[in-house]
Every structure is written in structure tokens, then in C-alpha cells.
Amino acid sequence: MSFEADLETIAATAAANAAEVDRGTFPQATLKALGDAGLLGLVSATSVGGKGRGLAEAAVVVERLARECASTAMVVTMHYCATAVIEAHGPEDVRRAIAAGKHLTTLAFSEPGSRSQFWASLNTAKVDGDHVRITGKKSFSTSAHNADTYVWSSKPTAGGELSTLWLVPRTTQGIRVDGNFDGLGLRGNDSAPITAEDVRVPQTARLGEDGAGFGIMMGVVLPWFNVLAAQVSAGIMEAMVERTAKHAGAGKFEHAGSTIADLPTVRAFIARMRIKTDQTKTLNSDTLAAIGGSRPDATLRVLESKAAAGEAAAEVGDLAMRVCGGAAYRKDVGVERLFRDARASLVMGPTTDVLYDFIGKAVCGLPLF
């Protein structure tokens, strides 16, 4: 089957399981389908058995999944982000396992002490012979109970204010996942706090040089995460437009012989939803073009993409609920879950407000940090 045909089949699996995932079940069936089709290894190099694709193709996968199940799309987003780091700096055996669809990975950056400023780690890593001992807490990590490995940040072993990244297996002694996720939206993404208590890993588990974590976060993770998170928002928005328009066309005022869509105000709301969605998708496409072409404005576009998409998705969600009225509170109409899922992008680090500050600095010619 072609990439497109595989993706449509997997999207159908995501759709069939979306309600159960929204009740808090991890999307194992869809992830297995992705693994079997080689799409968990989409961005793994062909030399280790992967598809050898890049961010643009990952963006297509994530957006399509998000139309059916944003929780699944977020799990895959984090997997692709972590895989990009592992491809550049990780061991071959893990790279091959990811390429084969047998290994799920994720990021473990955000901490209670630095909150949404994920680049600032307070975790410590102390040298112990040819190993290091990592101690600290992560406030949230997607796929916390289910990932095979975490791309984990700590302070450098040599000291300083930057960071170092490590590949930490979930089953390592001293790793503890605390509780289960019970949030407003993205309820099946298994986001939970993780504690590392004197976790011992070999120094070969380091991803990049000691102290190079900040550079990897900004140069690799931030572009991948922002673009893919913006694509999650775009997929949610596309689904909200489709389902809202369907409801408006089918909902009748039987006494008047008209539909909800016959109201000019309703059509105007749906038009605004369509415009916002198309604007988001256009900015996302231009961001990918800027990255692919190494354009001077690539960093600005990366910063803008997630901020703009998150704000737009929240607005489109508000309009969807407004058009569908009281029926929107019912799950069968199909917009209530999307409305909740759309909110997540606003508060995921880097948050929209942090991104606005970065964008303002970039436009004013000021350093971001």
C-alpha cells in the first residue's frame, strides 16, 4: 500500500477508537497499526530500516490523525520529536527498534521548577565511573507509562546553566511514573509526572555532548515540536469545521421548514471557522517551506506556527460550540471532544504567551534568551 493509503487506514482505526481514548485509554491499537505500516519509523533513516522521511511527512501524519483523535496525534508528535534527537545522537539498536515500529519514545523536559520554560532543567546528573546518576522530577511527559524510552534533560555533569540530554529506558531502576492523566483534553495521551531517584545510566546514554542539550532543544526539538503541535491544531480545526457544517445542514427548524445553516449568522460563523483553518494550514505550509529552504525567516515562522495555530484552534472551537448550541454538549455531535482537545496547545510549553514574547523579541531584533 502507498503512504497515503496506509495513513487513511490508520486514521480509520484512530476514529474507531477515539471515544475510548477520550475516556483515558492509551491508543495502543492505532500505534500498533502505525508500527506495522512503518509509520512509527517514518523519520528513521533508511540505513536502519526506516522510511527516511522528514518533518514535512511527519506533519502530514500528525494532521491526519488529529482530525480523528488528537490524543493519538500528540503521542505520535512526541515520538517523532524524540526520534529526531535519537536519529542524530542515539544508539543504533534503539534507532533500528524505532524504525521497525517496535519502540515508542517521547520527550521528558518539563519540570515543576521551571514549568513551561522547558529548556531550563533542575535535574542533576552526577558522574559515577562510566555511568551517571540522574535525580529529579518531570512535571508531565506524554506516553509516560507506555514509552520505551524518554529523551531526558538534566543539568550538565560539568556544571553550568545549560542542559544535557540522556536516553533513559522507562524500566530503569529508580524511574517512577506518578499517577494517571485525568485532564480536560487529550485525555488518552498518558501525560503524567515522572520521578528519577538516583537513576543510573551509562555515559553512553548521553545524546550529544555534555552541555549541548540546550542547542539540541532549540535546533532540533523546537522546530519539530512547534510545527507538529501546529499540525495537531490544524487537524482538530479541520474536523470541527466539517462536523459543525454537517450539524448545521442537518439540524432543522421543522416548524419553519428551514435548517440551522439557513441562518446568515450561522453561515458567517462557519465562514470564520473555515478562514481560520485555512490561514493556519497556510502558515504551517509556509513554515515547512521556510525550514526546508533555510530561509532567514525560518525561526520566526517556527515560533509563529504553534502560537497562531493554538489561538486559532481555540477560536474555532468556541465558534463550533456556539453554532451547535445545546447539542454541542452531547458527544454524538462530535465537537465537544475537539473543543476540549483544542485548548491544550495554549498551555503546552512553550506556551502561547511565551511564544508571543519570543516573537516580539525576534521582530525587535533582540536575543531570545
Image (cartoon, rainbow, N blue to C red):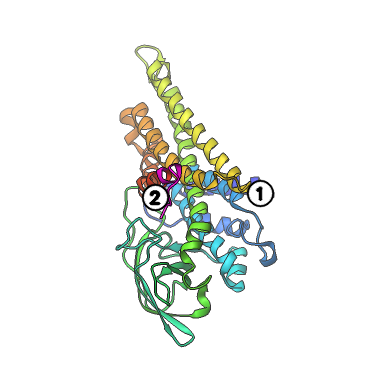
Instruction: Classify 10 Å Cα crowding around label 1: few (below 14), some (14-19), many (20 and above).
Output: few
Residue 282 shows in this picture:
yes
Q: Is residue 122 left or right of residue 286?
A: left
* Label whose residue precedes the other's in the sequence (1 or 2): 1
Q: Amino acid at mark 2?
A: Leu
Range of residues picked out in magenta: 360-369
Q: Is residue 3 left or right of residue 22?
A: right
Which residue is nearer to you in this view: 229 or 146? 229
Mainly helix, strand or loop, the magenta region? loop
Q: Which residue is mark 2?
A: 186
Q: Residue at x 37, y 78 (%)?
A: 174
Residue 102 shows in this picture:
no
Image spot of residue 221 (x, y percent): 50, 57
Mark 1 and mark 2: Cα distance apart in space: 26 Å
Q: What is the quadrant of residue 258 in the picture?
A: top left
Q: Which residue is mark 1?
A: 3
Q: Is residue 183 left or right of residue 166?
A: left
198 inside magenta stretch: no
| Proximity of marks 1 and 2: CB atoms separated by less than 8 Å | no
Q: Residue at x 36, y 11 (%)?
A: 256
Q: Amino acid at mark 1?
A: Phe
**Residue 227 in the image: above or below residue 103:** above
Image spot of residue 127 (x, y percent): 43, 83
Q: Secondary structure at mark 1?
A: helix
